[in-house]
Amino acid sequence: MIYYFAVQKVIQPIDQFVAREKFDLGQYYKNCIEGLKREGKLYGLPFKSHPGVSILFYNQSLFEQRGAGVPDKTWTLDRFLDAAKKVTQGDVYAYWPDTSQKTVLTFTRAFGGELLDPEGKKSLLNSPPAINAVTWMYEAFQKHHIAPTPSQASAAGGTTSMFVSAKLGSLKAGTWFQITGQQQVKDAFKWFATLHPKGPAGVFGSDYEIDADSITSVTKAPDASWQWVKWLTSQESGIRLGEIGGTVGGRPDVYKSPRLLKDPIRQVFLEAMESAQPGRPVYNTRMAEYESTIINGLMPLWEGKETPSRSFMDELTRQVQVVLDKPLP
């Protein structure tokens, strides 16, 4: 959304404020700062940031009961698949891979690819790594049956409800899912999180996602606005976000804060953030349309109505490219 606001001149670059007081941008993760730039200009500071849909939350009690082992950061997708087959029994499924565009991206990166070229103008959805990633997800639903289809999950009350009721052994999500565990699972069973299993590229697949605070172009108090943006993105503000629960500020001194690391799950989030891969926004700022085209286009695969053939992926890539070729709004 920040790219759209920048193009529409709703917000202004903050480079002048940074330069005037020699403000240290090194307080924030580098990829957070780079992700808030468009055509070389910085349009905000990171209020929140996380490593994308890159975390595996799991029901440890269930995995142990089924003799599947306990997932950890050394697991590969092959190792995880073997475990998931043991966990899946009756009306209990082992896994929810998530079906968002953000998930397809992190899976594709785990297979060594990207969904967009560096300029954000060309779709790479029909590249070999992306097809392999989509195929792995498809087989989780339709070949190995370790995951409920979206319609099955909906009929069961949704994947969050399934996880809370121990009908789902694990799911791929972002750091925000910690709140669900703390508020809904509580101590009904032993649960924890780890980096999502690695793909053939040797990485778990991640993506810097950033929420920013910016200064509007029409403000009558630019200096006060700059002070407000700095406070909202300070270390203390970022830590307090974490103490409320969920995603925190996009700063190393927040992710490494002893106040947050008292919760062991935060160490997992820190490790994921330290190795997270930079984002690639769509150039024409039509991110919502881009995401919905991919999500809706892949749905027939997850439901078993189509297969991830080359012709299917080529046609979907063509549809995505139509969106990317549209002019700036």
Image (cartoon, rainbow, N blue to C red):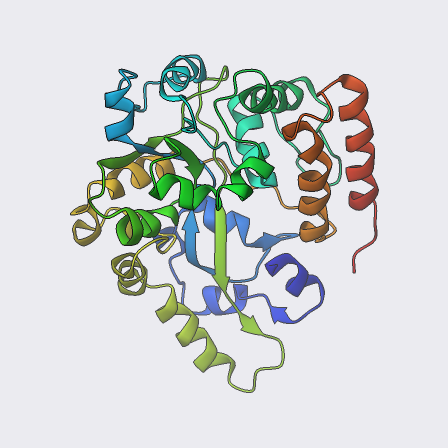
> Splitting the image into 4 quarters, where does residue 137 fall?
top right
Q: Residue at x 57, y 32 (%)?
A: 149
Q: Which residue ends up furthest to the front in the rendered image?
A: 90
Query: How many numbered markers are drawn?
Result: 0
Q: Is residue 103 left or right of residue 260?
A: right
On-image quarter of the C terminus? bottom right
Q: Residue at x 44, y 17 (%)?
A: 77
x and y, in percent, of residue 53 in the image = 47, 39
Q: Residue at x 16, y 50 (%)?
A: 258
Q: Nearer the viewer, residue 120 or 129?
A: 129
Picture layout, residue 319 above or below residue 204: below
Q: Nearer the viewer, residue 216 or 102?
A: 102
Q: Residue at x 68, y 28 (%)?
A: 301
Picture layout, residue 111 above or below residue 228: above
Picture layout, residue 31 above or below residue 59: below
Q: Nearer the viewer, residue 132 or 115?
A: 132
x and y, in percent, of residue 285 in the image = 70, 53
Q: Which residue ends up furthest to the bottom in the rendered image?
A: 220
x and y, in percent, of residue 93 in the image = 43, 28
Q: Is residue 73 left or right of residue 187?
A: right
> Splitting the image into 4 quarters, where does residue 155 fall?
top right
Asked whether the viewer can see residue 70, the reply is no
